[in-house]
Image (spheres, coloured by chain):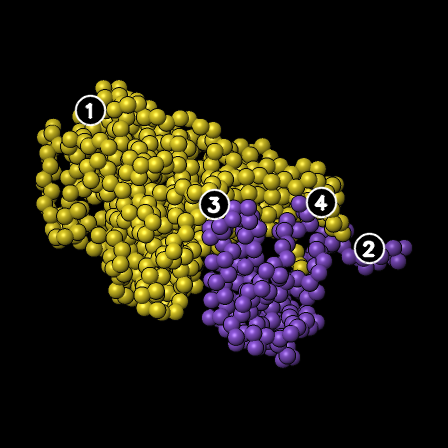
Chain colours: A purple, B yellow
Amino acid sequence: MDALTLSSSVNISKPFHILALSKKQQRERHPRTQFGVSCRGRKELGGGVEDNLYKVLSLSPKSATTDDIKKAYRSMALRYHPDVCQDCSKKEESTRMFVQLNAAYQTLSNPRLRAEYDCELGLRSEKISVGDETWRYIWQNQLAELKRRSHIRMAQNQGSWGSRIRPQNIN
Amino acid sequence: MVEPAYTVTSDSETTGEEKSSTFPEIAIGIDIGTSQCSVAVWNGSQVELLKNTRNQKIMKSYVTFKDNIPSGGVSSQLSHEDEMLSGATIFNMKRLIGRVDTDPVVHACKNLPFLVQTLDIGVRPFIAALVNNMWRSTTPEEVLAIFLVELRAMAEAQLKRRIRNVVLTVPVSFSRFQLTRIERACAMAGLHVLRLMPEPTAVALLYGQQQQQTSHENMGSGTEKIALIFSMGAGYCDVAVTATAGGVSQIKALAGSTIGGEDLLQNMMHHLLPNSENLFKNHGVKEIKQMGLLRVATQDAIRQLSSQTIVQVDVDLGDGLKICKAVNREEFEEVNRKVFEKCESLIIQCLQDAKVEVEEVNDVIIVGGCSYIPRVKNLVTNVCKGKELYKGMNPLEAAVCGAAVEGAIASGVNDPFGNLDLLTIQATPLAIGIRADGNKFVPVIPRDTTMPARKELVFTTTHDNQTEALILVYEGEGEKAEENHLLGYFKIMGIPAAPKGVPEINVCMDIDAANVLRVLAGVVMPGSRQPAIPVMEVRMPTVDDGHGWCAEALNRTYGATLDLVTLQKKA
């Protein structure tokens, strides 16, 4: 098992593609998902692009409503929950897919998490204003992380580079 | 009666998936309550409750050791109810199983006619039954196994086939250690546990099936319905909030506590005879009889107070000790005010955890023996702003029916009419995590996480050149590690020497659909893609009896030398 990330990643795009979408969803589906520049770079250790959470639920990013997300989740759950898996040899794979399904649903069913995710996908064209709560939240998190790392380095090196160099210059 | 044929099997036989067979053997559902039990099975088109030789669907949960041959409430009938309180009969085993002798619940059981002794040092309590004037020791697991053997025999006689797979209902507040004790009792009885289902989750599954059938009849769409399920029996109180649509029931939140009818009874007994604990301390034959008489009289009074507002208690305990007292309903409710307040707080907490407003609840379901108590109905109705209670279920049968449906689904049964096109997406009742950040409990899998689940956190060392780390896995809701149940431990060795904070220790927890927990841990050095040492995988719980001692010993021996801290990792 790859310890770098203990979660095994399963490429679940293919089986979902063969699922029939409703006519409305088919018509509105975009041929290619647009990936814009994200505020936070996400390094995919396994290689390849991370699966789109909307694809996991077999939904169109722009037109999916809250009810659509719930219905899609339930429909997928009835297919992939290990309790309803008929073929025992596929139970483990089924479990992995269900875990991914849950992760996708967790994000997309929470309006704030979904907005953040949409921003990462570049689906929102509005410029992020200074007053945007989401942007402020992300910025504060990043700043807190930088402070934490700075404290760790200070503790390890008994001070910053500057504070170590200054006494030498005096000599 | 022939000596019951149960065997002592290895502890390693626990819940898990069995190999598939061509024709699925349908698992039966069993609901062993603290005071009553029942068995049900999917018979091809609906759930059927099984009956014993006396045509009873609901049986008493006890085992009597009278005449040296133990027999349970399934097949044997005590000639008088007093006989159950003679000291030869063990009951309340569901309340005693998997507990240590410092537990207040165990101490409350000392007021029962059979013998419960504690040393108050964190070991399992001593339990014995009075047989031919001798105390015969036993364990809650053994008592439960004897009882399960009889249930199994009854089911096999009715269904005319071998029974092996079962789905059992369990209280929400059961720890994983207690679940392993239940599984062990089932193994001793020759039964394989397919699922252990929290009681409100079983009720949710039955509710989902009913909604599905209603939807079929009305040709309606899968509108989402939010249900609040309140279950209170003799030993436990459980609450769940579920969202149901199209046959899929999502458990949004669970809450549970060890309060029930037994607490109401004990409080009333103490109210009627304030000095009872001292009087009954010796556990002599006379005291046991007095205990039994008081218990029967109090039980009758509580039952009558469900249908009338005042009741007369007249009981002669002998030795000039008489109780002659009129008790009204308000008095009963005042004596048990704390119990009812706890029930109310469970409901409120569960709604908050589910992020559901009371107004959003479509159906309020009350099940369990205590659902007949007016005060219980009132408190649930009051929290739910006067919403009318759901009437589609029998309160005493709902949990076992849900367990039977789950047994059919988990056994892979297909129903052509779609009655089993159901799914209950379960949630973890308690958080699971490790000790880190200096004796704190750091949840890796939070409470109410959807199952199956797989989550990981990254930790790092606390000392320069630290090469080992002690992983202590706990389950519970307390902020400090010791406030929770210790599930197990293992040591990570061979961490490359580096300044503290540099190694990345990845702790992953995996819960499968059968609720089996595995903890995996690996070490990665920054910049490297290869694990520094082989990944460890430990199935939990591993800690057995006396787990209180184990946690103390680990702390005393290792202290903070092998501690970890949480690493805030940015993607």
Regarding mark 1 in the picture, which secondary structure is present there? helix
Q: Do labels 4 and 1 share a chain?
A: yes
Of tags 4 and 3, the one toward the viewer is 3
Q: What residue type is labelled 4?
A: Pro
What is the C-alpha distance between the residues marked 4 and 1?
66 Å
Judging depth in this view, the residue of B185 and A155 nearest the camera is B185
In the depicted structure, whether residue B484 falls above or below residue A110: above
Could you tell me if the residues under marks 4 and 1 are in contact, i.e. CB atoms within 8 Å? no
Q: Are marks 3 and 1 on the same chain?
A: yes
Picture coordinates of residue B375 (x, y %)? 22, 55
Regarding mark 3 in the picture, which secondary structure is present there? loop
Picture coordinates of residue B236 (x, y %)? 32, 46
Q: Which amino acid does label 1 sit on?
A: Val
In the depicted structure, whether residue B346 falls above or below residue A69: above
Of tags 3 and 2, the one toward the viewer is 3
Residue that numbered label 3 is attached to = B514
Picture coordinates of residue A29 (x, y %)? 59, 75
Which disc number belongs to residue B434?
none
Could you tell me if the residues under marks 3 and 2 are in contact, i.e. CB atoms within 8 Å? no
| Label 3: how many Cα within 10 Å (few below 14, some 14–19, many 20+) | some
Q: What residue type is labelled 3?
A: Ala
Which residue is rendered at x = 49% and y = 70% of the image? A68
**Chain on which label 1 sits:** B
What is the C-alpha distance between the residues marked 4 and 3?
29 Å
Which disc number belongs to residue B285?
1
What is the C-alpha distance between the residues marked 3 and 2?
58 Å
Which disc number belongs to residue A164?
2
Residue that numbered label 4 is attached to = B531
Which residue is rendered at x = 70% and y = 37% of the image? B494
Q: What residue type is labelled 2?
A: Arg
Could you tell me if the residues under marks 4 and 2 are in contact, i.e. CB atoms within 8 Å? no
Which residue is rendered at x = 51% and y = 48% of the image? A87
